[in-house]
Image (tube, helix red, strand yellow):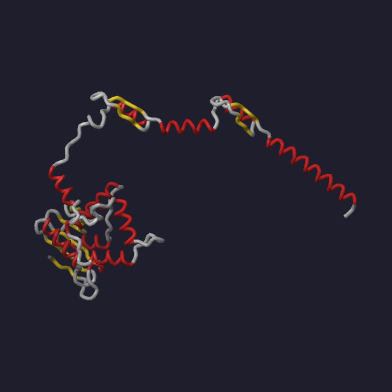
Amino acid sequence: MNKQNLECENITNDIKNELNGKNLIDITKKWERKCPNCNDTIYHTNKVNRDRLNRLQTICRKCVGESQRLYKTECFERICVNCNKITIYKTRHSFNQAERQNRLCFSCTPRQPCKEETKRKIGLKNRGKNNGMYGKTHSEQYKSWLRNNFDRNKLKPTKVGIEKMRKSLIGKKTSEQTKLKQRLSHINRLLINGGICPMHNKNACNFMDNYGKLNNYNFKHALNGGEFYIKELGYFVDGYDKEKNVVFEYDEPHHTYVSTGKLKERDVIRMNLIKKHLNNCKFIRYNERLNEIKEY
């Protein structure tokens, strides 16, 4: 390397060091002010912030923490209008609310007594023989159940928990009343959330129109005023002639068994419930798998 190049490099390094030193001095320069509360010195790295906070008369962090601690430990007292007892409130919000509503103390507030029948039921439920978890708190119950039925590392059922669930469900069948409640609650939820549009088959609607013209029926279906809805049962029927009290159902292949072509059990139960509700109406079904029409 030439002597001139070395000299140039040294000069540039010296200039850089000088500039860095100036920047460091500017950055580390502190701007002082006094706390209006405790008169301690507060340091700022920016003159603009120092002047702004001084103008607003903000206190130091130490004073802020002290004020928050005092606020948390502060109690609000209020005298009851009825018995002149002192009631202590932990928060300002609850104190202001009690003042606004002119609330009485806990002992003066009228309360509805518990019924004797309710007391008897609670006593029976909490006896050791009938309640296996008697004597344990809710958190202990939950912990013991979680420990026995779920893996600690992953919140998944253990083999023991799965076996318990399987055994508890063996032989249990959902009653028709429970199914009805589930259907109605699901339909109501759909109606609240923006309406319901049951699935329909265009071929089935055309088939019903042709069958109705040949046999003097006027079926109401999805493309002709909407499917008839039975509120009490929570069912939509494919087609219904109200004047002649005739129901028409178009059974796609999934409604029948593959081997025999007979109607599935759940569809038979549904049909019997609809017939009973509509005063033993006439029920016509078209079986798409066997390509036959049958009256029930």
- Residue 49 coordinates in the image, percent (x, y): 60, 30
Q: Quadrant of residue 40?
A: top right
Query: Of 245 and 68, which appears nearest the observer?
Result: 68
Q: Residue at x 66, y 33 (%)?
A: 30
Vertical side of 83 occupied by 155: above or below: below
218 to the left or right of 150: left
Q: Quadrant of residue 239?
A: bottom left
Query: Of 149 and 165, which appears nearest the observer?
Result: 149
Q: Is residue 228 visible?
A: no
Q: Residue at x 14, y 59 (%)?
A: 273
Q: Is residue 271 visible?
A: yes
Vertical side of 22 occupied by 226: above or below: below
Query: Of 256 and 292, which appears nearest the observer?
Result: 256
Which residue sits furthest left? Answer: 279
- Residue 206 coordinates in the image, percent (x, y): 24, 61
Q: Residue at x 30, y 27 (%)?
A: 86
Vertical side of 222 occupied by 30: above or below: above
127 to the left or right of 42: left
Query: Of 251 and 45, which appears nearest the observer?
Result: 45
Tally of numbered discs: 0
- Residue 28 coordinates in the image, percent (x, y): 68, 36
Vertical side of 13 occupied by 217: above or below: below
Q: Quadrant of residue 103?
A: top left
28 to the left or right of 252: right
Quadrant containing the C terminus in the rendered view: bottom left
Which residue sits furthest right? Answer: 3
Quadrant containing the N terminus in the rendered view: bottom right
Q: Residue at x 22, y 57 (%)?
A: 132
